[in-house]
Image: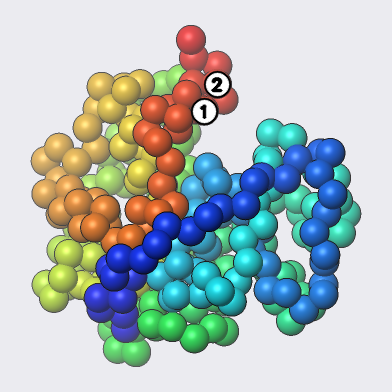
Amino acid sequence: MAAAAGLASSAKETLPPALGSTSQPPPVFDGTTSLYICYFCPFAQRAWVTRNFKGLQDKIKLVAIDLQDKPAWYKEKVYPQGTVPSLEHNNEIVGESLDLIKYIDSNFDGPALLPGDAAKRQVADELIAYANAFTKALYSPLISHAEVSDEVVAALDKLEVALSKFNDGPFFLGQISLVDIAYVTILERVQIYYSHLRSYEITKGRPNLEKFIEEMNKIDAYTQTKNDPLFLLDLAKNHLKIA
């Protein structure tokens, strides 16, 4: 499994502009491997981080979609679900972020992001499977304008405990893996949202979670995909209709 890969500094990638409703579509199914993302979508960010960590910037082209002005051709010609991320590879389209990060890991060169060890692999599968439920638990009170719920506390405590299972590093499986990528882009946002909108610090009393976020923020493959926190907060306020 990957150790120090992704930590090495590299020149910041020049990102293509996001394509909107009046943009011409790029060539589709022409043999180019393309990752369709939105720069501020946490689910697309998972695939983007995985691509970067494996050093695939020259092999997987980024195509940014403006989700606030989505081009019709994206759904018609590329991915019928119309969501991001999706990957065009070998004349096929793969979508759904948790499936896609596994696909990128297993179909491309670069550091392996899932363990060979059977015990760690079982934990990895369980935690990746829980990621959607975690996201729902953390976002639901924000969407419904409710206070911090017992479900939120329990979900965060579950991660705190999970982060203590292996002692060979600060990540979920000790060393960095797809599990970390599955959670960090969600945590990046809910840490901001709960701090500003609920006066609740998600890392308070959770030293493992605090250390995890601190260590992830040392990894270029992740930090190069991050947005300005206040930009994310403004997006959330807009979406939640908060003045």
Q: Residue at x 75, y 40 (%)?
A: 20
| Residue at left offset 20%, top offset 51% | 214
Name the kind of residue labelled 1 in the image.
Leu
Q: Residue at x 41, y 47 (%)?
A: 226
| Label 2 secondary element | helix
Q: Is residue 122 left or right of residue 65?
A: left
Residue 106, position in %: x, y?
52, 83
Q: Which three-letter amino acid code belongs to the residue tagged 2?
A: Asn
At which x and y percent is residue 2? 31, 80
Crowding near pointer 1: few (<14 within 10 Å), some, many (20+)?
few
Looking at the picture, how far across and down is residue 126, in whole percent?
Answer: 39, 69
Q: Residue at x 52, y 28 (%)?
A: 235
Tell me if residue 131 can be seen: no
In front of the other: 90 or 242: 90
Mark linked to residue 159: none
Q: CA distance from mark 2 to mark 1?
A: 5 Å
User: Is 14 rendered above or below residue 50?
Assistant: above
Q: Is residue 199 above or below residue 126?
A: above
Out of 44 and 220, give the one closest to the viewer. Answer: 220
Q: Secondary structure at mark 1?
A: helix
The residue under label 1 is 235
Compared to 154, does 57 lie above or below? below
- Residue 129 percent coordinates (x, y): 46, 64
The image quadrant of residue 119 is bottom left
Q: Kindly check if marks 2 and 1 are in contact, taking CB atoms under 8 A apart as contact.
A: yes
Direction from residue 74 to residue 94 in the image, left or right: left
Q: Which residue is mark 2?
A: 238
Disc 2 crowd rating (10 Å Cα; few below 14, some 14-19, many 20+) is: few
Horizontal side of 59 relative to 168 (left or right) equals: right
Q: Is residue 208 visible?
A: yes
Vertical relation: 154 (above or below) 184: above
